Amino acid sequence: MRNERSEIVICGAGIAGITAAYQLAARRGGTGITLIDEREPFTLTSDKGTQGYRNWWPGPDDTMVRFVSRSIDLLEELARDTNNVFRLSRRGYLFSTHDEQRVPELRSTAEGVARFGMGAVRVHPGAAPYSPALAEGFENQPDGADLLLGDAALRAFPYLSADTRAALHVRRAGWVDAPALGGLLLKRALGAGVTFLRDRVTRCDTANGRVTRVRLASGRALDTECVVLATGPLLAETGRLLGIELPIFHELHARVLFHDTRRIFPRWAPFTIWIDPTRLAWNEREGATLASQSATRHLLDPFPGGVHLRPVDGPRGDELFLIWTFHSAPTSPVWPPSFDPQYADVCVRGVAAMMPAMRVYLDGDYRGVTDGGYYSKTADNRALIGPLPVAGAFALGALSGYGIMASQAAGELLALHVLGEALPDYGRAFLPARFEDPRYVEEVKSWGALTGQL
């Protein structure tokens, strides 16, 4: 039987693969493009995150600020073109602390990100008044960040703990309706001629160091000289089909969908993050029970900073996303993933430390619904975008927890690689080959494991 032909085969129909198809076909007129996934599009990990975006990237240099800022540019352009069908907001990210000693650090970090291109830092009280964010939409909002000190923070965000000493409001930030964004991009890609196959890639043939064919579980085979690996947490596995070991690892990250039935957290609030370490409040009976079992004794220890939450559906509904990354050990992806049974309870208690009014939920049994997915990461927490050692093969992955916010710049950069066009100046920072440089590998070790992660 004669094989079928495809000019470009994209493996994976999450946000990365869909955006690559959109960029190649709808934005650049590419033809003969096939998008392949064994699942329905956008159903593995792309719809399991917080769906947020930010131009807040504290280092080690300005690479990620420029990269994600370009992606936000493209998101805003798409929102304007579609009457904001995917509900791009600009509520911002709010980092808060009750530790007076952390305030100078928060200000210094913000000033560093400002030098990278985030925008100016404004301090309140100060010469200019603080301007609250819009509840809906993204136009005509400031960039940079507002640092609100003491009473200024509590006047602007009265739901925070009364002992809050500072709140930093990052302004070019917010969230999107990620499934709507993915659906829009997929519709435009298909409308531009992309073919979607519900199938699984089982083998990639090569000859003379070049991709020649992709074989599928259904028995079909596609002759091609260009394969894009955009398989999310399956990227390492897919790379091995080409005999390539990619330098990535995985972390399981969870979120809680919580119904705030008492409407305690304002629906207008930004994405709110408590940066202080927290010791959870337990009553005497709960504390004794936890202490009696080795599997739960750790719940009595201090937890790292970083509990955060946001309204899910803008001014409507009562749903919140609660997120707290206190489990981050590398792990192997397992489908479906399973989550710590205590995770939701810990998140609710952490949020109650930041926002005491939430303590009314501690006496009830309801703790929301926990789901999530895997972060695929590199040692420098930067994506892998570009050519692989096998000619005609390209990687688009390791987008960690910033897949939605970086998707548009990532897909664009991938398309430029595939088409042999000029790259932006940040393009080299994402080349898979960077990890072949021993000096770079050593440099990355000094950056810290949480570079760029909230």
Image (spheres, rainbow, N blue to C red):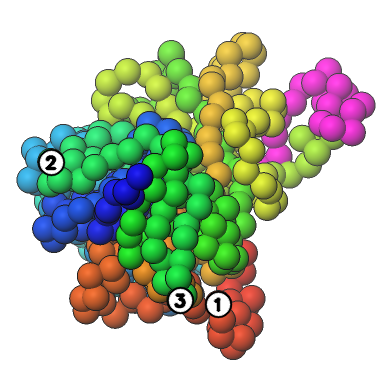
Q: Which residue is mark 2?
A: 191
Name the secondary structure under disc 1. Answer: helix
Going by the numbered disc 3, the residue's amino acid type is: Asn
* Residue 194 location (% of width, % of height): 21, 46
Seen at 89% across and 33% down, the residue is 294
N-terminal of the pair, mark 2 or mark 3, is 2
Magenta span contains residue 282? yes
Seen at 48% across and 22% down, the residue is 258
Viewer-proximal residue, 48 or 194? 194
Going by the numbered disc 1, the residue's amino acid type is: Phe
Q: Are marks 2 and 1 in contact (CB under 8 Å)?
A: no
Viewer-proximal residue, 263 or 409? 409
Which range of residues does the magenta coloring cover? 276-296
* Residue 2 location (% of width, % of height): 32, 48
- Tell me, yes or no, if residue 108 can be seen here: no
Q: Which residue is mark 1?
A: 435
Is 55 placed above or below 257 here? below
Name the secondary structure under disc 3. Answer: loop
